[in-house]
Structure formats: structure tokens, C-alpha cells
Image (cartoon, helix red, strand yellow):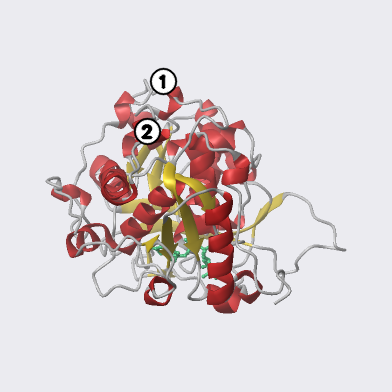
């Protein structure tokens, strides 16, 4: 059994507490608190964890533009229970520090938790909500252009006006929180299109942009994308747990595997091929709702086993690490030299299904060879992590063939 001694109770969720991170230390942030403006955001509740990480990068890159003009601080939304988090434990109002290293995020743009925002402004008030949506009429004449306009709400708003004229609704379980103004905004384009709106069209000090997934990346795959991505370092307690499993079960550690990283991500510039990885093949096998959403991408058990056997032989490996959201038993019966990470109760209770998933991703990211499930953002994020660690592309950007592609 693997257990981790975490003495910092504030990391765990359930009871929001101050984490004490000091945004004033953010490089270049010399301004006083009084000129701060706050950008709070959130994503459609139905979206999964790894798309949410992608949306964070879109927001962070827009923050760069805002900060060229004004002292904007990013407020990250507490994690509410996601559709894929099926364990029978309380998983609401989870702070970001449960999953991510806030100091690393702060090296890219200044970021605070929502509870810090309330603490800092001394009030549960959000000045204004902008609720993003598409255009009711769709694209005109099939012509796509970047645009943004205040419009009537297409769907019935999830926030409502109370008798005092204040907007109430779900604010991550904080019942005292309310907003002063609310507007629906139709938008088509990248997140930069929102900058003039925030800088010039509103003077609200705190603005909550909901449904941020409606806007796209500013320059996908370019320098800013990767900087924002690299700043999304997993929380140390999760990396430590993954490292412990690597060491004790997979004979894998950073010195041997050439995956030592500087704690400050801005100092890491890994050359492709510099990382060797641990002596195992890692497989991410996405199942559950993927079986219905992307049936062509999920191979049968037999075909998965055949592909794994071929890879073991080709790469001269004798151990398989399997990360999956399916029942692991069927694979364990497959007679493959296979191991899985089975989180002890202490870890699950403290970090939830989200934390356990990150540990799986971390272990996959350190394998000599990785193969994931096509189209899964869970696998995409592992690809990126390996890219950052310095793995070769051909040992990273792989996905299992579905039965159709194999002609079976
Ligand atoms: O992360 P995610 O958006 O990736 O959603 P996809 C999948 C979730 O399932 C993860 C769990 O965040 C985990 O909670 N999960 C999947 C796993 N694979 C593993 C694994 O190997 N280990 C562990 N511990 N957990 C999309 C969703 O998922 O799939 C969409 O974002 C939709 O909402 C679509 O459901 C069908 O991109 O794979």
C-alpha cells in the first residue's frame, strides 16, 4: 500500500481556507492592491477535467493582454464535482492547490483562489457577470468572422435577480456570493477578443466571465500556449505520490530516467530526446463514456492486448503501467506483465478522483514509451507533459488503433 503523509490540511478540500500565497511577490506586480481588477472565470459544468486545463491556458493568455494595460489578477474557480468523478466521497469546492502548484501558475500570471478574492476584497460581491454564448443565428452565409456583442440570452440564464436587484445563483457552493450586474455576450473568436470589452466597455472591478470555453486559444501551439501550459505544474503532493509508485513498483526515478526538472519551470528547456524514462510501457486506456462518444477509438480487450504485446517486444520492455477509467480486472487477467496504481483511501479522500487521475497521468508521463487513446484530452495532456519532460515525439504521440482501423 502507498500512503503519503500530508500535514498541510489546507490542501485537502471541503473547508476552504486561506493558502497564504502572496501574489504581491509576482514578478513585475509592483502596483498596490487598490488598482487591482479581478477576472474570475468558469467553464460549462459538463466539461471534463482536461478540457478545463486547456481553458485555463486560454484565460491565462488573455490575462497577458489585459495586464499590459491594467493590474488584472486571475481568480480560479473552485472545482465542483465533475461528471467523471464517481467515487462516493464529497468532492465540491475543491481549491486549485489540491491539484496544481500555485507558485508555478503565478510565474506566468498572478493567480489567486476564489476564497482569497473574497478575503482580499472583503466582500462576497462580484461586480459583473458576463455569460458567454454563441450567436443565435449561427454563421451568416457560412462566413466565419471574429465578433463579440451584448445580446439577449439564448438559454434561460442560470443566475436570477432577487428582490434587491442582485444576481444570485450557483457560485461554487458559496451561498453568500452574489453579483451586481449580469449580461449575456455572444462571441465568436479567440480569447483576445474579450480584452477590449474588459478594458474599455466595463469599469467593474471584478468581472466573472462564465462559459469561457466559448472562446478559442489566441495562438494555439505557439510560445504563449506552451508557457501557460508549462506553468500548469501539478501539486507537489501528487507528484511525490506518483514518484513513490515509480520508484517502488516500476524501478523508475528521475536520475536514472534523465527526467530531473528544476522546481522553477521557467528554467527548464528540455531538448527532445533528452529524457529516457522508466523501464516500462505506459498505456492510457479511456473507456466508460468514451465507448459511446468515440466507439471507433476504443479497441476491444483482445486488440488492446495484441497491440501492447507488440510494443513490449519492439521496445524490449517487460513491464506495462495501465491507466484506465475502466474496471482493471479484465486487463489484469490478460497475463500481461501489468501494474496499475490503486490509490489508498487516504489519497482518494484527500485529493479525490481528480488527484488520483493526475497521479496516473504523472506515472504515464515518465514511461520510456507511451500510448494513449485517440481524441482523449486526458491522453493529450500526457503527450504535452512528456514533451515538456524532453521525451522523443515517436515515444510520446501515440494512440491505440480502434478495431476498425485494424480491420478487425
Ligand atoms: O479528463 P477528461 O476530460 O478526458 O475526462 P477525455 C475524463 C475523466 O475520466 C478524467 C477519468 O478527468 C478522469 O476523471 N479518467 C479517464 C481517468 N481516464 C482515466 C485514467 O486512466 N485514470 C484515472 N484515474 N481516471 C472527454 C470528456 O474525456 O470525454 C467529455 O471531457 C466527454 O466531457 C468525452 O465525457 C466523451 O477527453 O478523455
Contact (Cβ within 8 Å) of mark 1 with mark 2? no
Query: Alpha carbon of mark 1 to alpha carbon of mark 2: how far?
Result: 38 Å
Return the x and y of residue 371 as percentages of the image width and height: 55, 55
Drawn side of residue 199 relative to residue 135, left or right: left
295 to 246, vertically: above or below: below
- At x 18% / y 50%, what residue is drawn? 4
Viewer-nearest of discs 1 and 2: 2
304 to 356, vertically: above or below: below
Return the x and y of residue 397 as percentages of the image width and height: 61, 49
Asked whether 278 or 229 is in front, the reply is: 278
Is residue 95 shown to the viewer in this render? yes
Drawn side of residue 246 relative to residue 143, left or right: left
- First in residue order: circle 1 vs circle 2: 1
Return the x and y of residue 46 as percentages of the image width and height: 48, 69
Residue at the limit of the structure toward the left, as seen here:
7
Which disc, if any, is residue 330?
Answer: none
Drawn side of residue 319 relative to residue 97, left or right: right
Asked whether 344 or 119 is in front, the reply is: 344
* Picture quadrant where residue 372 is located: bottom right
Q: Is mark 1 within 8 Å of ligand 1?
A: no
Q: Is mark 2 within 8 Å of ligand 1?
A: no
Q: Residues within 10 Å of mark 2 (few under 14, many from 20)?
A: some
Where does the C terminus fall, quadrant-wise?
bottom right
Drawn side of residue 215 relative to residue 326, left or right: right
Residue at the limit of the structure toward the right, as seen here:
141
Which disc, if any, is residue 256?
Answer: 2
Asked whether 322 or 150 is in front, the reply is: 322
Return the x and y of residue 391 as percentages of the image width and height: 53, 37
- At x 74% / y 74%, what residue is drawn? 407
The residue where tag 1 is placed is 28
Amino acid at each position: 500500500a502507498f500512503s503519503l503523509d500530508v500535514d498541510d490540511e489546507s490542501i485537502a478540500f471541503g473547508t476552504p481556507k486561506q493558502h497564504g500565497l502572496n501574489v504581491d511577490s509576482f514578478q513585475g506586480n509592483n502596483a498596490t492592491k487598490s488598482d487591482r481588477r479581478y477576472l474570475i472565470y468558469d467553464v460549462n459544468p459538463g466539461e471534463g477535467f482536461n478540457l478545463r486545463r486547456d481553458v485555463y491556458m486560454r484565460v491565462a493568455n488573455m490575462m497577458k493582454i489585459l495586464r499590459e494595460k491594467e493590474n488584472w489578477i486571475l481568480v480560479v474557480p473552485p472545482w465542483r464535482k465533475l461528471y467523471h468523478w464517481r467515487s462516493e466521497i464529497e468532492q465540491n469546492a475543491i481549491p486549485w492547490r489540491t491539484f496544481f502548484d500555485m507558485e508555478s501558475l503565478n510565474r506566468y500570471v498572478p493567480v489567486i483562489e476564489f476564497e482569497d478574492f473574497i478575503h482580499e476584497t472583503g466582500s462576497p460581491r462580484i461586480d459583473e457577470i458576463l455569460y458567454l454564448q454563441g450567436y443565435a443565428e449561427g454563421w451568416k452565409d457560412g462566413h466565419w468572422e471574429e465578433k463579440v456583442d451584448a445580446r439577449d440570452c439564448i438559454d434561460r440564464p442560470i443566475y436570477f435577480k432577487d428582490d434587491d436587484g442582485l444576481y444570485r445563483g450557483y457560485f461554487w457552493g458559496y451561498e453568500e456570493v452574489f453579483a451586481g450586474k449580469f449580461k449575456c455576450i455572444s462571441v465568436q473568436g479567440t480569447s483576445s477578443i474579450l480584452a477590449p470589452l474588459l478594458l474599455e466597455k466595463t469599469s467593474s472591478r471584478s468581472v466573472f466571465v462564465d462559459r469561457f470555453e466559448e472562446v478559442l486559444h489566441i495562438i494555439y501551439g505557439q510560445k504563449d500556449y506552451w508557457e501557460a501550459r508549462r506553468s500548469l505544474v501539478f501539486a507537489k503532493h501528487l507528484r511525490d505520490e506518483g514518484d513513490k509508485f515509480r520508484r517502488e513498483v516500476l524501478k523508475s526515478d528521475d536520475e536514472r530516467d534523465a527526467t530531473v526538472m528544476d522546481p522553477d519551470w521557467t528554467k527548464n528547456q528540455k531538448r527532445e530526446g533528452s529524457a529516457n524514462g522508466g523501464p516500462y510501457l505506459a498505456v492510457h486506456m479511456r473507456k466508460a463514456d468514451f465507448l459511446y462518444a468515440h466507439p471507433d477509438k476504443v479497441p476491444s480487450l483482445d486488440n488492446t492486448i495484441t497491440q501492447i504485446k507488440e510494443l513490449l517486444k519492439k521496445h524490449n520492455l517487460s513491464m506495462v503501467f495501465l491507466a484506465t477509467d475502466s474496471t482493471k480486472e479484465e486487463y489484469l487477467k490478460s497475463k500481461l506483465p501489468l501494474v496499475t496504481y490503486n490509490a489508498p483511501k487516504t489519497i482518494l479522500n484527500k485529493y479525490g478522483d481528480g488527484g488520483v487521475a493526475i497521479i496516473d497521468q504523472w506515472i504515464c508521463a515518465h514511461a520510456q514509451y507511451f500510448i494513449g487513446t485517440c481524441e482523449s484530452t486526458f491522453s493529450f495532456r500526457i503527450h504535452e507533459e512528456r514533451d515538456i519532460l524532453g521525451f522523443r515525439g515517436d515515444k510520446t504521440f501515440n494512440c491505440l488503433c480502434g478495431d476498425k482501423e485494424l480491420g478487425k
